[in-house]
Each structure stands twice: as C-alpha cells, then as structure tokens.
C-alpha cells in the first residue's frame, strides 16, 4: 500500500498538478505585486506633477514681484506707503467711530466690554500689520538661498 501511495505521489502527473498549483500561486502573487507597483508609479507621477506645478507657481509669483524698470519700481515704492497710511487712517477712524457708537467702555458691562474691545482691537491690529508685512515683505532681500540651504550674499 505504501509503495502504491509513493508511486502516485512521485508520478509525473502528481508532479505536474503540484507544479501547476504552485505556478498559479506564483503568477497570482506576481499580478498582485505588479498592481501595487502600478499604483505606486501612478502616485509617484501625481506627486511629481503636483510638485512641478507648485514650483512653477512659486517661480511665477517670484517673477511677478520683480520690477521691470525704474519707473515701475518708483511707482511701487510710492504707492505702498500711501496705501499703508490710508489703511492706518481707516483703522483709526474705525476705532473713533466704534467708541462714539458704543459710548465708550463706560456704557457696556465691564467684563463684556473688555472682551469685545480686546477681540476687535486685536483683529484690527492683526489685519493692519499683516497687510503691512505683505506689502513690504515682497521686496528682494540682500541674500539668496539656494537648494542646499547655503546663503549667497549679493554685493550692493
């Protein structure tokens, strides 16, 4: 009986069946790995495209901040302080109007008045300082940073 069982197990038919089964398992695993590689490649391509788009947008913004001539630079330099002055004048006018409308802090519950006044003033000052920073921060600096993080200083 054992001899008969061994002859069946070691026969070429059994070897073909076992080999075919493991071959099918191997191909199935290869298909799974290939699908995973395709998903990885697609995500890599999308990430590279996104990075390229962001880089080109950053370079376009950088180019848009450069002045092309002395006349445009003079206009830009003259308009920024004017706009900043007008902004702060409006902030001051808003504070005065707010005080006149509410009757000052004396007409409201002191705790509520302090909380309201603090929130409004912090918001106004924050927005004004953000606008000022935005306008004047777009000027080129005296140093350029390259990709490795090394700073190269330009001669004035």
Image (cartoon, rainbow, N blue to C red):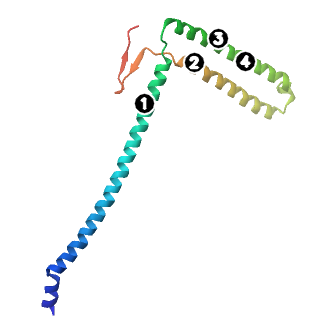
- Residue at image x 69%, y 25%? 124
Q: CA gap, disc 3 to disc 2?
A: 11 Å
Whether tag 1 and tag 3 are in contact, CB under 8 A, the answer is: no
- Residue at image x 81%, y 22%? 99
Q: CA gap, disc 4 to disc 2?
A: 17 Å
Which comes sooner in the sequence, label 4 or label 1?
1
Total marks shown come to: 4
Q: What secondary structure is found at the residue carrying circle 1?
A: helix
Which quarter of the figure is the N terminus placed in?
Answer: bottom left
Question: Quarter-wise, where is residue 7 in the image?
Answer: bottom left
Q: Which mark is residue 146?
A: none
Task: Please give the residue where the numbered disc 2 appears in the rendered image.
Answer: 135
Task: Please give the residue where the numbered disc 1 appears in the rendered image.
Answer: 55
Viewer-side residue, 24 vs 127: 24
Look at discs 1 and 3 and give the one toward the viewer. Answer: 1
Which comes sooner in the sequence, label 1 or label 3?
1
Q: Which mark is residue 82?
A: 3
Look at discs 1 and 2 and give the one toward the viewer. Answer: 1
Q: Is residue 79 left or right of residue 48?
A: right
Q: CA gap, disc 1 to disc 3?
A: 33 Å
Which quarter of the figure is the C terminus placed in?
Answer: top left
Q: CA gap, disc 4 to disc 3?
A: 12 Å
Residue 8 at what x, y percent from top left? Answer: 16, 85
Which comes sooner in the sequence, label 1 or label 2?
1
- Residue at image x 12%, y 90%? 3
Task: Please give the residue where the numbered disc 4 appears in the rendered image.
Answer: 90
């Amino acid at each position: 009986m054992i001899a008969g069982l061994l002859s069946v197990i070691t026969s070429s038919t059994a070897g073909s069946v076992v080999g075919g089964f493991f071959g099918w398992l191997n191909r199935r695993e290869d298909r799974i790995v290939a699908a995973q590689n395709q998903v990885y490649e697609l995500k890599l391509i999308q990430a590279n495209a996104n990075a390229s788009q962001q880089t080109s947008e950053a370079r376009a913004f950088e180019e848009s901040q450069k002045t092309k001539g002395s006349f445009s630079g003079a206009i830009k330099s003259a308009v920024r302080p004017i706009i900043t002055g007008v902004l702060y004048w409006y902030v001051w006018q808003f504070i005065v109007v707010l005080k006149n409308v509410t009757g000052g802090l004396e007409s409201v519950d002191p705790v509520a008045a302090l909380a309201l006044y603090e929130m409004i003033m912090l918001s106004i000052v924050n927005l004004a300082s953000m606008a000022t920073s935005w306008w004047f921060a777009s000027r080129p600096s005296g140093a350029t940073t390259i990709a490795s993080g090394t700073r190269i200083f330009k001669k004035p």
